[in-house]
Image (cartoon, rainbow, N blue to C red):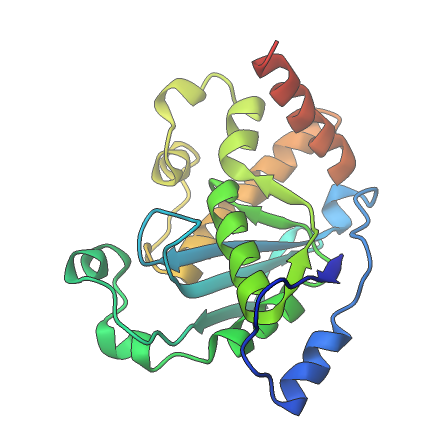
Amino acid sequence: MIWPFSKRALPALDAASSARRAALARHKVDLNLPLADMRWCVVDTETGGLDAQRDALLAIGSVAIEHGRIALDASLEVGLTQRQSTAAANILIHGISGSEQRAGQAPHEALLDWLEFAQGAPRVAFHAAFDQTVLQRAAREQLGLSIDAPWFDAAVVAPLLFPDAAPHCRHLDDWLAHFGIAVYARHGALADAYATAELWLVLLQAAQRNKLTTAQQLRGLLRARRWLSVH
């Protein structure tokens, strides 16, 4: 669901953007569908630093998984225009030049594009808490919206389904290498989302082999893991 929420002045929206904001559906994702039938929104973000609560959101990349396959015709990459470019040291990490940062879309338009793309689908990311926090903060600040959607963290699911690999697989690149997934471009929002989607397909197949047939059952596994970790 997406709920209007604002306790601060929002950027002024034109009529078209206001209509798009109002049209965002308020409906829950059905997690009881078979895993193979789900539409998944795999997402990665690029930011100006590592502080999800403060650093600027620079770019969003998303790939859709539909009916057990990456939908090659369903992807999204948007850059958010920045008033001030990030430091040169940060540019070396995220690879988005100062001119590219200043040439991006208006932040509210980029977020509307992503929210429309992701609508009705659970979100998937590697280290999802970071991307979730960044996107929720941006949607709140730019659109006055509170995003209530289920998130799945591939970095948590992978070691649960492949515990023998967990000791030597810490990063996304480790898991890709473990499964022999060849990715020819990395470290951009869309490229990293695509890499995560490739990994997620492997994890979905493993979940089904382990008799987890719905997203709700997979979510239950994650909740059980969190319960065990604090007891």
Q: Which one is in front, 160 or 37?
A: 160
Q: Residue 28 in the image: state x and y as whole percent.
A: 81, 53
* On-image quarter of the N terminus: bottom right
* On-image quarter of the C terminus: top right
Left/right of residue 175 with respect to residue 43 in the rendered view: left
Q: Quadrant of residue 8?
A: bottom right
Q: Which one is in front, 165 or 160?
A: 160
Q: Quadrant of residue 203?
A: top right
Whether residue 148 is situated above or below residue 157 in the rendered picture: below
Kindly identify the residue that appears in the image at 68 percent across and 20 percent down.
Answer: 224
Q: Can residue 74 be seen at all in this image of the molecule?
A: no
Q: Which one is in front, 53 or 179?
A: 53
Q: Residue 108 in the image: state x and y as whole percent.
A: 54, 75
Kindly identify the residue that appears in the image at 19 percent across and 58 percent down.
Answer: 92
Q: Which one is in front, 159 or 6?
A: 6
Q: Residue 188 in the image: state x and y as whole percent.
A: 35, 60
Kindly identify the residue that appears in the image at 41 percent across and 65 percent down.
Answer: 59
Q: Residue 223 in the image: state x and y as whole percent.
A: 68, 26
The residue most toward the bottom is 15
Q: Report how many numbered discs are placed on residues in the image.
A: 0
Left/right of residue 77 with respect to residue 26 in the rendered view: left
Whether residue 127 is situated above or below residue 55 in the rendered picture: above
Left/right of residue 51 with respect to residue 40 in the rendered view: left
Q: Can residue 206 be seen at all in this image of the molecule?
A: yes
Kindly identify the residue that appears in the image at 52 percent across and 43 percent down.
Answer: 128
The residue most toward the top is 231
